[in-house]
Amino acid sequence: MSETDTSRRKFLVGSATAAWLTANWPTGVMAADNAQMGGGFAHFTPAQAREIDAMAAQIFPTTDTPGAREAQAIYFIDLALVTFAQDKQPVYAKGFGELAAKTKEMFPAAASFSALSSDQQIKVLTAIETTPFFRAVREHTIMGMFSAPQHGGNYGKMGWKMIGFDDSLNFKAPFGAYDV
């Protein structure tokens, strides 16, 4: 496949995703509001949410800046799995089993991945980093850090503040007027 075909395909996929989000905006906003206001999760059980939240916290950790946990990326991921990323539900379903099996294999006394220490979690994630499950969680975590807050993540616009994104929609041309 040529680079042009790849670029065209990426554009079409991105356009289709944007169109779907636009068409389903009210449902998504309502689901995100419910989740963040303590209404629970749309897709995950509480135990699954703890596992994904722990993974996300290691993928985008808290340092001197907020991480995935503070940005509430878990709510974005949960919402994504019932909206634009429904096709990833089987990847997550299989991945939970793989995560539990790898956790038990490496740390037999552990009750769950989320119960491990940070160092132990990193060892497990390193062992599964080439799996479709890890790649999906990583992708969704990053999206949850920087997406528009109405999609469930980027709580308090933390991700945008971190990168200096101005969402005021009050942009000025950098060198003055262009329509002279």
Image (tube, helix red, strand yellow):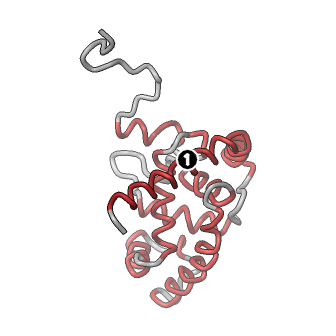
Q: Name the residue located 48 percent from the left edge and 57 percent from the top edge.
A: 141
Q: Is residue 56 left or right of residue 123?
A: right
Q: Name the residue located 70 percent from the left edge and 62 percent from the top edge.
A: 43
Q: Residue furthest left?
A: 175
- The N terminus sits in image quarter: bottom left
- The C terminus sits in image quarter: top left
Q: Position of residue 119 (x, y in %)?
A: 38, 72
Residue 33 vs residue 132, the one in the foreground? 132
In the rendered image, which quarter is residue 29 located in? Answer: top right
Q: Answer above or below: position of 22 versus 49.
A: above
Residue 166 vs residue 118, the one in the foreground? 166
Q: Position of residue 168 (x, y in %)?
A: 47, 23
Q: Answer above or below: position of 104 versus 12.
A: below
Q: Amino acid at mark 1?
A: Gly
Q: Name the residue located 47 percent from the left edge and 23 percent from the top edge.
A: 169
Q: Secondary structure at mark 1?
A: loop
Residue identifier under label 1 = 153
Residue 64 vs residue 26, the one in the foreground? 26
In the rendered image, which quarter is residue 85 located in? Answer: bottom right
